Image (tube, helix red, strand yellow):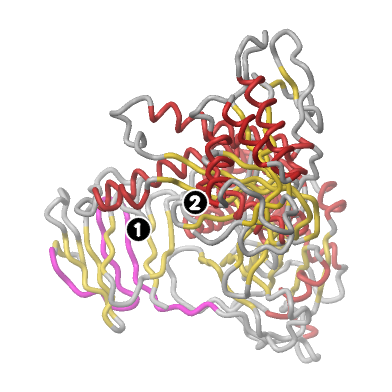
Amino acid sequence: MPELIAQGILPSHRWRHSLPSGQSVELGRATRTFSVPWDNRISRRHVQMTLHDDRVNVVKLDSAANPVFHNGAQENVFWLNSGEHFVIGETTFTLTFDRAEATLDVPMPVSQQTFSHDFLERVKYRDADRRIEVLSRLLDLISSATEESELLTRIVNTLMEGIPGAASIGIVQCDQSNQSHADGIGLNVLHWDRRGTGSGDFAPSARLIGEADSTGETVLHIWHVSQRKSDSKDAAYTFDYENDWAFCCPLENPATAGWAIYVAGANRPAAVAGAGDSDLTRSFDTGSGAMDLQGDIKFCELVGSTLKNLLQVKQLDRRQASFRGFFSPVVLHAIAQQDPEEVLAPRECDVSVLFCDLRGFSQKSEQLAGDLSDLLNRVSDALGVMTHNILGNGGVIGDFHGDAAMGFWGWPLEDQGSAAQAVLAARGIRDAFAEFANDATHPLSDFQVGIGIATGRAVAGKIGSRDQVKVTAFGPVVNLASRLEGMTRWLGAEILVDDVTARQAVVRPPIDGVAKMADGDQGQERSAPAAFQLLGNFQPYGLSNSLNVHALLDVPPIDGTSGTADSNERYAKALRAFEAGDWIRAMEELNSMPRNDRARIFLESYISRHNDEAPDGWDGVIRMIAK
């Protein structure tokens, strides 16, 4: 693939980037990929480049202040062929069509060494000051990279600067399923560069990369050892290859699985045939002194360790960012401490499931038919209120259904207080929409909510097909929560819960005006207790079993002066008479309640629809029908 090489005055002022075919890209100090921040003679947007077949069309932009030189002449529009270059300011840009591919066409090494981490820790640099100076700039260089391609470019540049004897350096990736690499398949060159602007393919040894990948340690190969003239007629190894040595440093890390740094050079070893391995790696004649190859390997490992640790941190950040919209902070912390695949694996557990549906959406959609963007923004804001309360109370966002949201508790962390947390979330949602209703100017003032909560056994985790996976809960308890949410329309209640939820969300008496959850409160203080009213025994539409359904009540004042407690007691008496079939007595109790009481309104309506008389075979169960 064609690549453009930029080279400034300093060795670190360099990059090598692939040019996309048929797509125009811009080069300048403030462009994205082809950015040249080191040269102030280059404008923010200086030239536009377009690859056509085997050459590049270069056009100087109107915003460019300084000239572009091609073939020694100032030009505004020109074609750039392979091996040619152009110059802007103090930076040269060269087009190359070099290939990069791991190869088996490499002879067996005359020397191979493996360097353990413990051994390299004991190695001392010969030029420690220079190495440390390069390393001191490394973290700032790579942490400021905005894209992976830019990051890999900076890593390779740093290695070039720190290993002066290297002719070429690349970052490669091995296919972890092909451990032997015997056929060379599964090796990919992520990024590479060579010293200077020379051309030529980059062909790292697949055998060397495979050795390092399989051992997990840095491996050195030396292919060509010069012989004494007296030994020239012996069977000396005379393979004429671009590089005489190379080493490969694997980057073992979940974020860099299969990655490795490959460094090669053409410096001739000063040692003669028969010299020990340590001699071969200790003294390489570069023409101006000895090459510190062991120090180079140690330097490469330090740079590689910084790279893989940084990428792992970024990977965790990305994972948490992708989960942040679905998991509460406490769940995110658990995921960060363990293998996410293990934590998110589906398993059977006890959960509390909350379904919340937006009321008034259909009417509002008719009113805003000419401004669907406004409607979408309002629905998004409403869903935001739901998710904020679910996540804020330790829940997981399980799904969205149009204008409805589903959340659940009890996974991936087991929590005995999941029912209480779900109730707190429901109350927060209800109170928020009640506040909106009091402000006619609020965009959500016309909306109400219906909420159903059920607690029971479910399978929770990453669930789905090969093509689409989502984190959610599955089981009868999920369907029950949905049915309870649907029943809020019938019963005139905003929040309905099943028996298990009502029982588990019982509260202790207030202490200094602050109530705490009775089960699994984990020491978290809450501002007010929850109170429930048993509405009756119902068989929801589509279900074969009946259950007790409770409504979450507004909490009465601590001193008990409100008449709410008396109304609740009268409804309880009416319900007992109703379930026993004494509907006349039930009506007498209901008539003593406030006329706007929603529980009274529902039960009176039900009795009236049956002519004030319990039907034959009455068993006290209210069977819901589709509506």
Comparing marks 2 and 1, which lies closer to the viewer?
A: 2
Residue 329 picture quarter: top right
Left or right: residue 303 versus residue 70 is right
Q: What residue do we see at 74% from left, 14% from top?
A: 510
How far across and down, in percent of the image, does residue 223 sit?
Answer: 72, 78
Observer able to see residue 345: no
Left or right: residue 163 versus residue 272 is left
Amino acid carrying label 2: it is Ala
Of residues 471 and 131, the one nearer the viewer is 471
- Asked whether residue 111 is drawn in magenta, I would say no
**Residue segment shown in magenta:** 76-100
Give me the disc on residue 34. Answer: 1
Amino acid carrying label 1: it is Phe
Residue 336 picture quarter: top right
Give me the disc on residue 81. Answer: none
Observer able to see residue 377: yes
Q: Secondary structure at mark 2?
A: strand
Of residues 151 and 275, the one nearer the viewer is 151
Which residue bears the numbered disc 2? Answer: 404
How far across and down, in percent of the image, does residue 184 sit?
Answer: 67, 85
Upstream in sequence: badge 2 or badge 1? 1
Label 1 Cα crowd, 10 Å radius (few <14 / some 14-19 / many 20+): many
Of residues 86 and 146, the one nearer the viewer is 146
Q: What residue do we see at 64% from left, 44% from top?
A: 131
How far across and down, in percent of the image, does residue 207 sit?
Answer: 73, 80
Q: What residue do we see at 53% from left, 51% from top?
A: 609
Seen in the picture, residue 562 relative to 467 is either above or below; the reply is above
Q: Quadrant of the N terminus?
A: bottom left
